[in-house]
Amino acid sequence: MTKRAKRPRKVVTLRRIIQAAFVAFALFVGARHLWMGSGLTGAPSFDAYCPFGGVETLWRFITTGTFLRKLHPSNLILLAATLVTALLTGRAFCGWICPLGSVQEWLAKLSQKLTGGRRAWLPLKIPPAIDKPLRYLKYLVLGGVLWNSVSAVVPPLEPFCPYKTLFHFELHSLISWSVFSIVITGSLLVERFWCRYFCPLGAILALFNKFSFIQIATDANTCIACGLCERACGMGIAGLPENIHHPECIRCLDCLDACPRPGALELRLPHSETEKENTGFAKSRS
């Protein structure tokens, strides 16, 4: 490995450690509630550990001061922490912390290894004409959840939540088995299937990518337009690096790790002098 590649590789290794830690924690919490029950331990329900629960119960809390069944003040605390993280780093929660996102990423890597490594036919590359409209589905899911949360008693997403299905081992109904099968199969076929098309929390966090405190910046004078960053993108964002501030970017930094040119892609504060000089990046590459 060359000297210039060590810094981003260390960041990638750190991300993987953090991902594994949060997946292990989610499995621990799920197993603990499955075996002991929240009633015996005095702990909140499994649902209380999800930041999106704060979105689902926000209307109930504002209007009545109470929470939807199975939710807890911890949901609002986690939601607030997630939003603060988004203000600082954009959609990095999805790429570094979310256990469901990590499992999907690992399933895609598994399918790649099983079907030929670098020349693998999986995960699939969805044509933009199909992929782009499908990405708006998560905003419809978010709208449906918000609408139903006004009159809900339990979290509206609960019966269809893959996070709870996978980490709380809730496979007791046709719906839960269907959700499990669709998410696992979808993640083997398309990297981060749920993140791309259905995750309502991802729909909220995507709004922060344009103005987060820390962003990925491009240097038009250094980039050689090799396309390696686009090939490395697990979210399938087209038009990189020109499209580096895309709402779907989860700040995984795989693009930085793949880039062969030091300084072509860097983490920077927004509106830095270097970034201002490169606002015409697309024009300079044409």
Image (tube, rainbow, N blue to C red):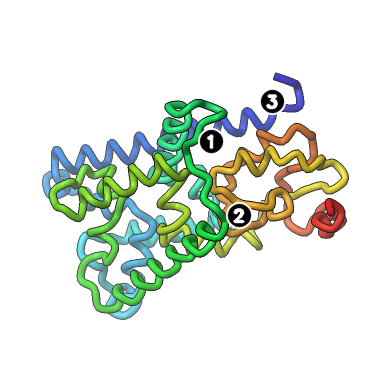
Q: Residues within 10 Å of mark 3 (few under 14, many from 20)?
A: few
The residue beneath circle 1 is 15
The amino acid type, in three-letter code, at marker 2 is: Leu
Residue at 82% of width from left, 55% of height from top? 281
Mark 2 vs 1, N-terminal side: 1
Contact, mark 1 vs mark 3 (Cβ under 8 Å): no
- Drawn side of residue 116 relative to residue 174, left or right: right
The residue beneath circle 3 is 6
Secondary structure beneath dot 1 equals helix
Residue at 75% of width from left, 32% of height from top? 260
Secondary structure beneath dot 3 equals helix
Residue at 71% of width from left, 41% of height from top? 227
> Residue 9: percent from the left, percent from the top?
63, 29
Residue 155 occupies quadrant: bottom left
Contact, mark 3 vs mark 2 (Cβ under 8 Å): no
Mark 1 vs 3, N-terminal side: 3
Q: Residues within 10 Å of mark 1 (few under 14, many from 20)?
A: some
**Relative to 134, does residue 126 appear above or below in the rendering?**
above
The amino acid type, in three-letter code, at marker 3 is: Lys
Quadrant in which the C terminus is drawn: bottom right
Of badges 2 and 1, the one in the foreground is 1
> Residue 135: percent from the left, percent from the top?
49, 60
Mark 3 vs 2, N-terminal side: 3
Separation of residues labelled 3 and 2 (CA atoms): 24 Å
Residue at 25% of width from left, 78% of height from top? 151
- Drawn side of residue 97 relative to residue 69, left or right: right
Q: What is the residue that sits farthest to the top in this orientation?
A: 1
The residue beneath circle 2 is 88
Quadrant in which the N terminus is drawn: top right
Residue 60 occupies quadrant: bottom left
Report the front residue among 171 and 126.
126
Secondary structure beneath dot 2 equals helix
